[in-house]
Structures are given as C-alpha cells and as structure tokens.
Image: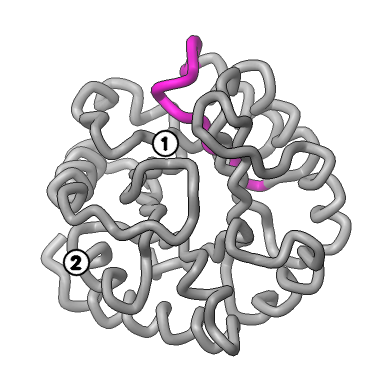
Amino acid sequence: MAPQIAPSILSADFARLAEDVARIADSADWVHVDVMDNHFVPNLTLGLPVVQALLQHSTLPLDCHLMIEDPDRWAPEYAEAGAKSVTIHAEAAKAPIRTLRTIRAAGARAGLGVNPATPVDGFEDILGEIDMLLLMTVEPGFGGQRFLDVVLPKVRRARELIKGRDLPIWLQVDGGVSAETIERCADAGADVFVAGSAVYGADDPAEAVGKLRAQAEEATAKADW
C-alpha cells in the first residue's frame, strides 16, 4: 500500500479547526483526531460533539484515535457519527473483539492502538478483527514529544506478524513523526503516518504533508518488507 499521511489536529488551532483542516484538504489522506479524556491519558482534548461538527466541514475522512478510559462504551458512537476509522487502545478496552466488530458493523475501519511498552505479540490471534494496528511512538497524552526509537523494533515485529498472516492491515505510527523520523518508520514497516507538529508547526501545512509523503514513499520503495 502507498504511504498515507494523517495530520493530527492536536497541533492545530482549536479555535479554527475547520480552517486548519481545510489547509491540508488537498494534500493529506486523513484527518487524525486525538480524543483524550484526562483519565486514560493526562490530557483533555475534544470529544464526540467536536467530531460531529468537523464531519460537517471536512472533505477528508476522519481517523479518530480514542485515548479514553471506556472505549467499549464510546467507540461505536464515533463510527455511527461518520468517522471512517476508529481506534481503541488495547490497554483500555475490556471487550476489544466485541468493540472492534461493532466499529466495523457501523461502517468504519477498526483500529487497535498499543502504547510503547505494550508488546504486539499478544494480539497476533486477533489480527483478523482489525483493519489497522496503531503503534504509539511516544507516550500518549501530549503533542510535540520526542520520537521513541525503542519502538522501531516493535514496528518491524508488527509488520512481520501482519505479513505472516497475509492480512490487509494498515500499520500506523503516531508520535514524533517528522522529516527526521518518518523514513525510519517507513523502513521498519509503517504505512500510515500521524504527524502533528511537523505539519501544523510548518508555515505551509500542505507543503509539509507533501514533503513527508515523498520521504515515506522513497523509504518504502527501498524497504525489504
């Protein structure tokens, strides 16, 4: 699969979200929405009402990343509202298979997210239940953090597991993705890249997306996976 870029609006201007989403409408593949509840992670961002409002203004599909305490309760509502991808965290879900299936039944891609210290091997048996595996490359909760290189071996391991099962699962990385790190992520096996500060911290977010895509495509073409 060709690399996909999903700018995170966590780094956008919350007072002008619709405008900032429009700035990357012709260059990005997704709008990545970080939903945080100040329980699962130590930050509070936005929730379902804001997502519903964004859906009225965005021409790009929404990729909702739920960093919340009770994803089993809330995840289906994001899919039913119109988000095209909804990711729950393995560390928070009490009934992940049921919730992933409910997300799919509502018409969205079902994603499973794991924190940096969470091994991926334990989820090998449920890979058939997901459409995307999200590997956090920072500790979740805040934007602008430094990329954790220690996660790269896990990205490679995740790619091996996916390839071994011959499943059409997207492998997403989120956290510290920038011009300095995206090639390493692509080389390790990632194909969907969440970038916040690297996009919205640039003078021209659309141009920044294009440059990141070019780097990812070049690295992917050289990768051995």
Residue 117: x, y in percent? Answer: 24, 33
The reply to whether the magenta stretch includes residue 85 is: yes
138 left or right of 64 in image: left
Q: Residue 113: which numbered mark, if any?
A: 1
Residue 101 visible to the viewer: no
Tell me the residue at 34%/48% (across/down): 138
Circle nearer the viewer, 2 or 1: 1
146 left or right of 211 in image: left
Q: Is residue 2 above or below residue 37?
A: below
Residue 35 visible to the viewer: yes
Image quadrant assignment for residue 149: bottom left
Residue 68: x, y in percent? Answer: 57, 28
The quadrant of the rendering that contains the C terminus is: bottom left
Amino acid, disc 2? Asp
Number of numbered labels in the structure image: 2
Question: What is the secondary structure assignment of the residue under circle 2?
Answer: helix
Tell me the residue at 49%/69% (across/down): 197
Separation of residues labelled 2 and 1 (CA atoms): 20 Å
Q: Is residue 213 above or below residue 136?
A: below
Q: Residue 127: which numbered mark, if any?
A: none
- The magenta segment is 84-97
- The answer to which of marks 2 and 1 sits earlier in the sequence is 1
220 left or right of 199 in image: left
Question: What is the secondary structure assignment of the residue under circle 1?
Answer: strand
Which residue is labeled 2 in the image? Answer: 187
